[in-house]
Amino acid sequence: MDYLNLIKQDLSNTFEGKNWYGPSTKQILDGIDAATAAKSFGPQDKSIWMITNHITDWMDEASNCLEGKELRHPKEWDWHPVDDRTEKAWCEAISRLAKSHQRFLLAVDGIKELNCEDEVVNSQGEAMGFTYEMMLQGIVQHNVYHMGQISLMKTL
């Protein structure tokens, strides 16, 4: 199996497949209602909802990168507050996560030639400080890390 297919398989498994470490993203988020998702934990007031949006936003930004779009500074889009805390809005956040997941898989599919050891550059040609391999693996690792947090938060 080539590297890009391995990344896609890992991402698909972590999102909705079987994993040796435990439940998938879909299994972890299943049954969480809006009130539980909006509950803040800890001194930084992070919630399941905020973490879910954070995962979505990072996958979207990685997709932008793979699609050749302008990369934005995380201060512009990361860790935004949840204003609408209705069940409908929570369902939309879950739907947005699923769409972001599919978009990322399609963006990886769209890569014709990629040297994974090449450094990612922005639209001005400036090096971003990480390689494509780091970014692709990082998305999978990032999602699993935050799903671990959500798994713990669900129990509190």
Image: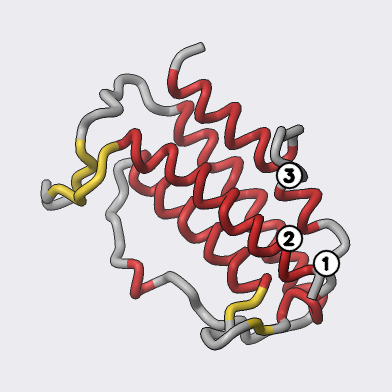
Whether residue 105 is situated above or below residue 45 in the rendered picture: above
Left or right placement of residue 140 versus residue 69 in this view: right
Residue 84 in picture, x, y percent from top left = 68, 84
Left or right placement of residue 94 versus residue 55 in this view: right
Which of the numbered marks, if any, corresponds to residue 151? Answer: 2
Q: Earlier in the sequence, mark 2 or mark 3?
A: 3
Q: Residue at x 58, y 79 (%)?
A: 46
Which of the numbered marks, if any, corresponds to residue 32? Answer: 1
Which of the numbered marks, if any, corresponds to residue 46? Answer: none
Categorize mark 3 by other alpha carbons within 10 Å: few (<14), some (14-19), many (20+). Answer: many
Question: Which residue is tagged 3?
Answer: 24
Residue type (three-letter) at the residue carrying disc 1: Ile
Kindly indicate whether the residue at mark 1 contacts the one at mark 2 (C-beta within 8 angstroms). no
Residue type (three-letter) at the residue carrying disc 3: Ser
Quote the CA–CA distance across marks 2 and 1: 10 Å
Q: Earlier in the sequence, mark 1 or mark 3?
A: 3
